[in-house]
Image: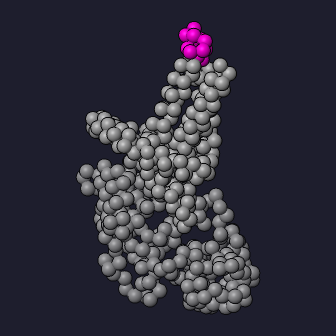
Amino acid sequence: MKFELALMIIEFIALLFCAFFFSATETAITAITRTEYKAIKKSRTKKSRRLAFLIERKDEIVSATLIGTNFVNTLSSALITAFVIDMYGQQHIPAATAITTVLIIIFAEILPKAVAAYNAVEITKTFLVPLSLVRLLLKPFIFVFSLMSNFIIKLVSKKQNNQSSELSEDYLETLINISLADGTFQTGEHELIKRAVRLHELKLQSIMTKKEDIVSLDINSSLENMVSIFRKTMFSRLPVYKGEKDKIIGSVHYKDILFYRSHNAEMDINKIIRRALFIPKTANIFSAIKTMSKNKRNMAFVIDEYGSTAGLITIDDISTAIFGSIQDEYSKTKTNPLSGMKIVDGTHILIPGAVPIIQLNSILNTDFHSDYNDTIGGLILETAEYLPKEGELITIGEVDFKVEKVETSKIISLIADVSKLTAGAQFPKAFQ
C-alpha cells in the first residue's frame, strides 16, 4: 500500500508539473508584447530565432497548450479517483475530488499564470525546446480543432460584423477609461484621445467665428485703411467683402499689403486676393479638414443654405477643439512681450526678440515684414542669415538693431536706434 501511495503521489506531482508547464507557457507566449517581439526578432542568436518562430505561430502554441492542459488535468482527476476507490472506497470520492481541484487550481492555474505574466520572455525561453516538441506532436489535433473552430466562427461572423460598428466607439471609450485607471494614460492624454474619438459629433457652428464677430476689409478700402485695420486686429490675414459684409469674396495677407506700401506702389487688390474657400454649415469637422487640406487652406468660410456667410473657421479652431487652448506669445496668460520694451534714451529702445513684427510696426510706424517669421528676433535672423553675436549691429530699413542678448540659437533682446525714423516712434504709455 505504501508503495502504491508513493507511486500515485509521484505520478500526480509529475502531472501537476506538466499542467504547470502548459499553463505557464500559454500565458507567457500571449503576454509577450510587440516591443519584446521586435527586440527578439532583431537578435541574431539561434535561440532568439527559434523563439520568434514560435511567437509568429502563437495560435498553434495556444491550441497545443490548451489541449495539453485539459488532457493532464483530466488525467490527474482520473488518477486520484481510481486510487481512492481502489484503496478507500467510493465514499471518499468527494473529499478526494475537492483536494484534487484545489491543488490543480493553485499549482496548475494561479501560480503558473502569475509567474508567466511577469516573466513572459524568460518562461518561453526556458521551455522553448519542450514547447516546440509539443507543437509538433499535437499538430494533427491542432489542425482538426482549427477546422472546427473556423467553421463555427464563419457561422457567427455575420452577427459579429453587424455588431462591431455599433460597439466600436463604446469599446474605444472603455479602453481609454481603463488605460487612465491603470496609469497607461495621464489625465491630459486621456482627455485628448476622448476628444478625438468624439470629434465626429462636433458641429462647425460650435467652433466657428460667428459672422457678426468677423473683422473684414471692404474691397474698396484705401491701402492706409487696410494697414490700420491689420495693425489693430493683429491678424496676419483678413477676409475681403464686396458690397455687403456677408458677401465674402476672398482674403488678403498682411505681407502683401505691406509690399505695396513699402514700395509706394498703387495697389491692385484683385491681384492679391486669395479666392475664398466655402464650406456648408451642415458639414462635419472631418469633411472640413479634408476640404481645407485638399485646397491647401488654413481658413474657410462657412455658408448657410442661402449662400450667405454664416461664419469663419480656421485650422487653429479645429486644433483647439482637439487639443484644447494652446498658449503662445500672444496668449494673455503669458507675459506680454511688449511689457519688456523699455526706452533706454530719447532714440534707443530695448526690444524683446519675441515682439511680433506687426506690433512693432504699429509702435514705430515702420513697414517691416517677413514671409517666414512673425517676431522681430526671427526677422533679424532672416536678414543676417546667421546668428549674430551680442553687440553686433544689424540694419533693417532706417532702424539699426544692436543685438543685446543671445541664448543658444535665439535672440532674446535688441536695442533699436530709431533716430533715423522720419515720422518718429509713437511709444505707448505702458513703457514710457
> What x and y, as percent, mark residue 176?
52, 43
User: Could you tell me which residue is drawn at 37 percent across and 67 percent down?
Assistant: 297
User: Could you tell me which residue is drawn at 44 percent across and 89 percent down?
Assistant: 263
Q: Viewer-proximal residue, 7 or 297? A: 7
Looking at the picture, does residue 389 appear above or below residue 98? below
Looking at the picture, does residue 110 appear above or below residue 211? above
Magenta residues: mostly which secondary structure? helix
Q: Is residue 362 shown to the viewer in this render?
A: no
Q: Is residue 152 left or right of residue 329?
A: left
Highlighted range, magenta: 84-96
Q: Is residue 346 left or right of residue 320?
A: right
Residue 89 forms part of the magenta stretch: yes
Q: Is residue 25 left or right of residue 306?
A: right
Residue 392 forms part of the magenta stretch: no
Q: Viewer-proximal residue, 112 or 308? A: 112
Q: Is residue 239 left or right of residue 19?
A: left
Q: Residue furthest left?
A: 306
> What x and y, as percent, mark residue 242?
30, 67
**Quarter of the image with the N terminus in it:** top right
Q: Viewer-proximal residue, 377 or 421? A: 377
Looking at the picture, does residue 364 appear above or below residue 132? below
